[in-house]
Structure formats: structure tokens, C-alpha cells
Image (spheres, helix red, strand yellow):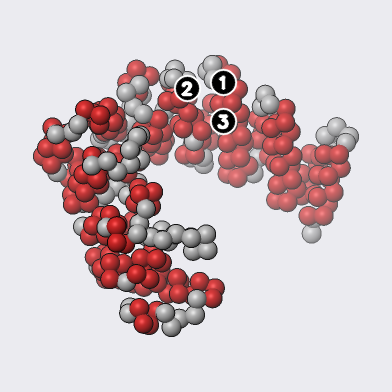
Amino acid sequence: MAETFILTVPEEGGRRIDLVRATFTELGNLHPDAVWELIRASPFAAFAAGARQTERHFPLSLSIAFGDSPLAAAVLFDPANGFSDDYIARYFRHGANNVVNARRILDEWIGGRWPGDPPECIRSAWLSLGHLDKEALSEIRAKLPETFQEAAGRFDAYDRLADYEGPITTDPDAAALLILGPGELAEFVDERAMAARPIPLAILAELPPELRKPAIEDYFNWLYPFHAGLAKQTIEELDRYGLSDSEKQSLLISAASYECNAHGDYETALDWTGRIADERVREETKREMLEEWAQQDPHSALEYAIQLPPGELRDDIERQAREGMP
């Protein structure tokens, strides 16, 4: 696609961007290298991919499949193409897919890119390289500066915990999870839930609050719809775990939302939100769920609203439910 052609396409309505997106897809189907060759050769293609982000042009999420190309890291890290560190970290957050990209990501990290707590893409690159080329990772580990050793230890610990074959029959104790960082722990909890062996909340409750925070916030993401029974049991036992009010609030709101969306069980969800300690949050969440219920199932919502104490909330929900009836 020549610049002289793409610039003849009207920009109104994002038509140029749409055309380049379609071109990326077609080229990627032919060969993943072709997408990166286009981005490297065409400033507009780089712009469309999100290198130079603006409020008007939200960055295009390049398909992860394009990352199979060893050109991906070379193009994304080339300053001439204008991709930000945040964009690169988000693109590679689920893995580097090959040795060339994984090594480049780790080299950039060791060279000073992404100072501070490493983004998720570093762990993904570390694990990818370990599975693709153990000798290459051993070489990097041997030369790793002291300031990076703690993060590398977390990556290795995560790899050991997540490296299982066949059905999972046991759960790690809290002590085994302490070496992980918040990101590794949250990822591990997600992986175990997707593998049909969720980590019990009772184990996470034994960990320091800052370590468990992301895992607590996302705890129910993978329990619905396949582990709804476990989710209900967890909510029933929530007060046993010694969690803070804010943690319990986050769990109650999350579980209630999934209960509504997965099962349409608004009565159970409202019972759970009634346990939120913060009165303002409790009442706001209750109103939001009742209003959603009035839209989704006005007949049932109206029957429930009649049981509410007389007042503004009851009047509003009854009105919305009646308006939503066919």
C-alpha cells in the first residue's frame, strides 16, 4: 500500500484507518513478517497501528498473532517508528512468541527501559525464553545485574508454581506464594481458575494485603460461569477470612455483578450487596442493580420492588419496571 494511495482515501469516519486495519489482517494471513514490513515502510501504517497516539485516533490493537514474526520487536523498538514504551509493553504482555523477540525485550529491560517494577511483558518474555531456549535464559540470568535479581526470582517462582502436568490435585500454601509479586500472584490465581482448580480465598487471605490486592480484586473473573457454586460458597464464608472492609466490598460487588450477568439472579446479588459496610456504596450499588433489573426483567423487578420500603427508590424502580414492560 503506497502512501500516495492511502492518502487519497477520505479520512472522514476513520475510513483510512479502517482500510489499513483490513490491510494488516490480510497481510498477516499471508505472512506475519509482511505486517511489520509495512509498518516499517509506511509512516501512515505506523500511525494507524497506534505509534503516534491521539485522542482522535485510538491505537489499533495489532493482532498477537503478528508477534510470531521476529521482526515485531525490531519494528516496535525502533525509535523511528514512534511506538511508546507503554504500547510495546501492552503488545507483548501475553508473550514474545519466539526467541528473537523475547531476547530483545529482556535486553531492553536490562538496558534501562521500564525502570522500577517491570511490566507484565518482562515476565512473559522471561518465561517464553525459558521454554524456547533454556540456554539463552541461563546466559541472561548469569549476567543479570543485582538490581534485577529480585524480579527474576519472582518470575522463576511463578514458572515453578504454574508448571504442572495433568490434573491439579493440591493447592500451594501461603508461604509458597510469598515470593511472588502482586502481578505474578494475580496471574497465577487466574491460571488456576482457568485450569478448574481455583486457589481458595482462604489461602490468599493469609498473604500481605498489598501482595494479594490485584488477585482479590479479580478473584471472581474466572469463577463464573463454571465455578458459580464455589463463588457462592466463598461469599457465604467471606467474613471468616479476616479481610478488610474494602476487600470485602470489592468481592461482594464483583460477585453480585457476575451473579446477575451469568444467572440473572438479582435477588441473590442484592442480598450480597446488602452486606457492604459503606452505606453510600451499598445504596448506590443496590440502586444500580435494581435499575438494571427493571430493564432486563421488568415483571420480576416490579414484584421485588413492591417489597421495598416505601420511598423514592421504590417509586423509581416501580416506574422504570412499568415503563419497560411491553
Residue carrying label 3 = 251
Residue carrying label 2 = 209
Task: Name the spot of residue 238 as percent of width and height, x first.
Answer: 57, 22
Identify whether 300 is placed above or below 14.
Answer: above
SS category of the residue bearing label 3: helix
Amino acid type assigned to the residue bearing label 3 in the image: Leu
Q: Earlier in the sequence, mark 2 or mark 3?
A: 2
* Mark 1 touches mark 2? (CB < 8 Å): yes
Instruction: Place residue 22 in its image quadrant.
Output: bottom left
Task: Name the spot of residue 68 as percent of width and height, x first.
Answer: 25, 57
Drawn side of residue 25 relative to residue 132, left or right = right
Amino acid type assigned to the residue bearing label 2 in the image: Pro
Q: Nearer the viewer, residue 99 or 105?
A: 105
Visible in this render: residue 136?
A: yes
* Mark 2 touches mark 3? (CB < 8 Å): no
Q: Earlier in the sequence, mark 3 or mark 1?
A: 1
Instruction: Place residue 9 in its image quadrant.
Output: bottom left
Residue in the picture at 65% in, 30% down: 272
Task: Name the spot of residue 24 as percent of width and height, x first.
Answer: 35, 69
Residue in the picture at 18% in, 49% down: 99
Amino acid type assigned to the residue bearing label 1 in the image: Ser
How many numbered marks, from 0 up? Answer: 3
